[in-house]
Image (cartoon, rainbow, N blue to C red):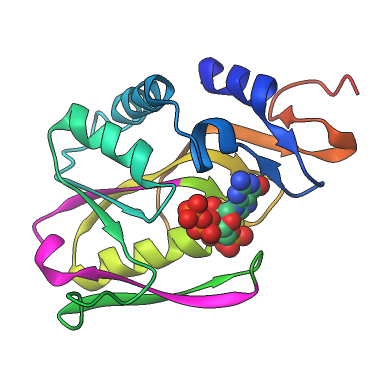
């Protein structure tokens, strides 16, 4: 998705060979017009699927997921990372280990908001080690929902997440695919390295 790639070229900050900072439009401040285009692109790529619900994880998945949900006219559910006061039982849960933060979180979705009648699209902002996406896949499977696929805003293709999702037999669509962040440069898949 060229619009997104250009935004990353202009505003993305390479913090290390593994981490791209995109706080100005995705992870802190949100660019709603870009998010709307991202929502449209997800809807286009999964237009062959009869999606009934979108599932994401708080917090940065919520903006792109909501835009896709608005276009499709379907509910958007965000998995919670912390136990809430009102969300206590009646939950589907999965353990998600973050290699980046070296901690495990239980993510959960109320059984009221996903069922075996759903066809779900799973959306997240970054795909790195794939643990968050695998957690969402686990929850969708527990609910007996049909998984239309996983939609990712930025995939770091040099990390193992993409392969893990495909190994699960789940379709993956990533709107910007990073080949490398070496030498302080963003290199996208299919692009020559001029650096
Ligand atoms: P994984 O789910 O693919 O295994 O990812 P990992 O544990 O490595 O990532 C943990 C958090 O860091 C996730 O956000 C993920 O989106 C984010 N992340 C991973 N790689 C990058 C990167 O290169 N740049 C940025 N900006 N973020 C990255 P989170 O903690 O759930 O945060 P949020 O959704 O609340 O914002």
Q: Any magenta on residue 108?
A: yes
Ligand 1 quadrant? bottom right
**122 relative to 29, above or below:** below
Q: Residue at x 37, y 56 (%)?
A: 57
Q: What percent of the width, then of the height, locates residue 153?
A: 49, 37
Indicate the quadrant containing the C terminus: top left, top right, bottom left or bottom right.
Answer: top right
- Spot occupied by residue 112 in the image (x, y as percentages of width and height): 9, 66
Check the image and report above or below for 60 versus 164: above
**84 displayed left or right of 27:** left
Q: Residue at x 27, y 38 (%)?
A: 66
Q: Going by the image, does 175 lie left or right of 192? A: left
Spot occupied by residue 7 in the image (x, y as percentages of width and height): 59, 21
Tell me the residue at 90%/36% (across/down).
Answer: 183
Whether residue 165 is visible here, answered yes or no, is no
Residue 121 falls inside the magenta stretch:
yes
Along the viewing direction, whichever of 114 and 19 lies nearer the viewer: 19
- The dominant secondary structure in magenta is strand
| Boundaries of the magenta span | 102-124
Q: Is residue 45 above or below residue 103?
A: above
Give the number of callouts. Answer: 0
Query: On the image, which quarter does residue 22 sit in?
Result: top right
Residue drawn 79% across the image and 39% down it: 181
């Amino acid at each position: 998705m060229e619009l997104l790639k250009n935004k990353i070229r202009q505003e993305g900050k390479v913090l290390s060979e593994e981490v791209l900072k995109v706080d100005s439009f995705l992870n802190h401040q949100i660019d709603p017009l870009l998010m709307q285009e991202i929502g449209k692109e997800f809807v286009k790529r999964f237009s062959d699927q009869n999606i009934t619900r979108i599932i994401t994880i708080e917090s940065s998945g919520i903006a792109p997921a909501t835009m896709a949900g608005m276009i499709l006219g379907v509910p958007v559910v965000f998995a919670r990372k912390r136990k809430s006061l009102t969300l206590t039982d009646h939950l589907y849960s999965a353990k998600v280990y973050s290699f980046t933060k070296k901690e495990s979180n239980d993510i959960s979705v109320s059984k009221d908001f996903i069922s075996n009648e759903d066809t779900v699209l799973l959306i997240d902002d970054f795909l790195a080690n794939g643990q968050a996406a695998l957690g969402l896949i686990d929850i969708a499977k527990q609910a007996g929902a049909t998984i239309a696929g996983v939609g990712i805003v930025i995939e770091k293709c040099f990390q193992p997440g993409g392969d893990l999702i495909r190994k699960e037999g789940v379709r993956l669509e990533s709107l910007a695919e990073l080949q490398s962040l070496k030498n302080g440069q963003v290199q996208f898949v299919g692009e020559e390295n001029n650096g």
